[in-house]
């Protein structure tokens, strides 16, 4: 699987360079998430700009990752969803539970805002 990792000061951007994502690909993505969150930088932006199709297994996996991030007190943001992917998430009624932004820049902003919120709340 073709993934690009870009590590910033407070987060990692993982860009998926595959046009189609299938459930059997979740293990490789999960392994990369585990690998990069072992250090002090734990927040993740998952960039879907190159993905035009996903199956239900990916959708379920994304929900699980969103929930795990909340439990682990870290941010998990998905950005640059293509219309067919967004339509699939709407159809499966899971788009609203995911932290999604139109652009990577907005995902950066979400992570920074969530970090400030955690600091203010003492988390």
Image: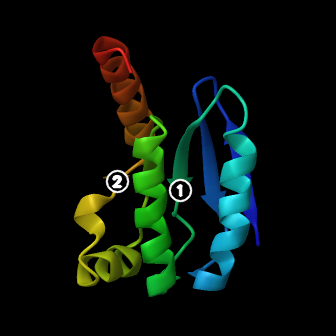
Residue 56 visible here:
yes
The label on residue 103 is none
Q: Position of residue 111 (x, y in %)?
A: 42, 33
Q: Are marks 1 and 2 in contact (CB under 8 Å)?
A: no
Taking 7 as reference, is 29 above or below it?
below
Q: Position of residue 81 (x, y in %)?
A: 41, 65
Q: Which residue is mark 1?
A: 47
Tell me what residue is drawn at x 71 percent, y 42 percent: 36
Q: Secondary structure at mark 2?
A: loop
Q: Residues within 10 Å of mark 1 (few under 14, many from 20)?
A: many
Taking 68 as reference, is 122 above or below it?
above
Q: Secondary structure at mark 1?
A: strand
Taking 42 as reference, is 5 above or below it?
below
Q: How is the image coloured?
A: rainbow
42 left or right of 36 in image: left
Q: Nearer the viewer, residue 104 or 37?
A: 37
Whichever of labels 1 and 2 marks the residue nearer the N terminus, that label is 1
Tell me what residue is drawn at x 66 percent, y 40 percent: 37
Tell me what residue is drawn at x 40 percent, y 65 percent: 63
Quarter of the figure that contains the N terminus: bottom right
Residue 54 visible here:
no
Q: Position of residue 123 (x, y in %)?
A: 39, 21
Q: Residues within 10 Å of mark 2 (few under 14, many from 20)?
A: some
Q: Which residue is mark 2?
A: 102
Q: Position of residue 94 (x, y in %)?
A: 28, 71
Q: In the rendered image, which quarter is residue 20 located in?
A: bottom right
């Amino acid at each position: 699987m073709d993934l690009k990792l870009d590590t910033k000061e407070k987060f990692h951007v993982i860009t998926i360079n595959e046009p189609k994502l299938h459930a059997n690909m979740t293990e490789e993505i999960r392994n990369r998430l585990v690998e990069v969150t072992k250090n002090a930088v734990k927040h993740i932006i998952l960039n879907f700009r190159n993905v035009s199709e996903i199956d239900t297994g990916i959708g379920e996996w994304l929900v699980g990752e969103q929930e795990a991030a909340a439990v682990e007190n870290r941010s998990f943001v998905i950005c640059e969803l293509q219309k067919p992917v967004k339509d699939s998430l709407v159809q499966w009624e899971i788009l609203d539970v995911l932290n999604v932004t139109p652009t990577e820049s907005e995902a950066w902003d979400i992570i920074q805002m969530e970090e400030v919120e955690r600091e203010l709340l003492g988390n």
